[in-house]
Amino acid sequence: MTSGGLGGPGWPVVEAAREAIRRHRMLEGAEKVVVGLSGGPDSTCLVDVLVRLAESLDLELVIAHVDHGLSEGSAEVAARVATTSAEAGHDVHVMRISDLEGPNLQARARALRYEFMHSLATRLGADRIATGHTLDDRVETTLARLLHGGGTDVLAGLPAVEGTRIRPLIELRRAATRAYCEARGLSYSDDPANENLDFERVAVRRILVGAIEERWGAGAVRAIATSAQRLGEDAAALKLLAARLYEGAARETEEGVRFRLDDVTALPRALRRRLLERAVGRVRDRAGGIDAALEALGGDRRGESRYAVAGGHEIILTAAEIVVTAPTGARPASPGAEQ
């Protein structure tokens, strides 16, 4: 990692990141930031960019690295990251994970990385967690979730700001981060897992994004990222509206969350879904109970009907009410709870 002032090699990338930080209000200044550094080109670029912006933004950087132990050279990468970060004067924290084999490997590894960074931020009093996700990551996430039938919220992909997490490189292509590292003479490591088509994200990157860019050009990839951004804006607006509607329409009882049927059927289907999802809480409805209930609400119903939802919840439609019951012993969702 190299320090550097205004201008010089790679400065357009620094300016692009600074503009993204300003536009999305990622940083206010005078903050401590935990920066995830995998050792790859994206995160290596991110650290160097933040170093170059640190003085003007009054930032204190803390480096976090997770060695998943999934490749032969992972220990060497961890040692290099720790050494170069320490030599650059950063506070650096490295965690090694063992026994990560099994299904959903990448998802579990990602969850553990975030858990480590969040716990580190809490312990050190850091204000933000920065990761090196790029525009390509956003597009790949949107396409992967589209393959699984995701709704508006998840199709938005990776937002620029997500709670305390920030992504200063989210508007840059992955090729730009690699070119930046080369222009700055920064050493980085390529993760062998990024070539393994058994991983869904790699397959989406190599097959889908590759085909889109080959047929329609780089502009098409940026267009998908723009669509993801707009989906995120729409999802945020619908979430806010649904929360306000929920506060006025939902009644919590010992049996569960109750709605007047007419209050719900007067709404568009998108808002009906959000009210039911908010009442159910954070579960993945693999059984399709929410969808079945929505179909019933839009059709010609007679008598009482019941729909099982994941996690032991149930949606009951009567002539006058909708009742969302929780599993025995579980509390109903609070109207003000974040869903």
Image (cartoon, grey):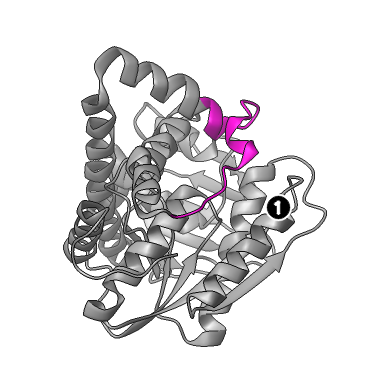
Image spot of residue 137 (x, y percent): 41, 42
Quarter containing the N terminus: bottom left
Q: Is 108 placed above or below 85 here?
A: above
Image spot of residue 232 (x, y percent): 28, 48
Q: Disc 1 designates what residue?
A: 74
Q: Is 151 placed above or below 129 here?
A: above
Left or right of 77? Residue 232 is left
Image spot of residue 124 (x, y percent): 52, 86
Left or right of 291? Residue 240 is left
Q: Is 200 placed above or below 240 here?
A: above
Q: Please, what secondary structure does the residue beneath circle 1 have?
A: helix
Left or right of 167? Residue 256 is right
Q: Is 233 placed above or below 228 here?
A: below
Q: Nearer the viewer, residue 23 or 318?
A: 23
Left or right of 157? Residue 222 is left
Q: Nearer the viewer, residue 306 or 184?
A: 184
Instruction: Give, as a three-letter code, the residue at label 1.
Output: Ser
Count of numbered badges drawn on the protein: 1
Q: Nearer the viewer, residue 66 or 23?
A: 66
Q: Residue at x 30, y 38 (%)?
A: 269
Per the rendered image, the range of residues in magenta is 186-203
Quarter containing the C terminus: bottom left
Residue 201 located within the stretch drawn in magenta: yes
Q: Residue at x 23, y 50 (%)?
A: 233
Viewer can see residue 151: no
Residue 159 located within the stretch drawn in magenta: no
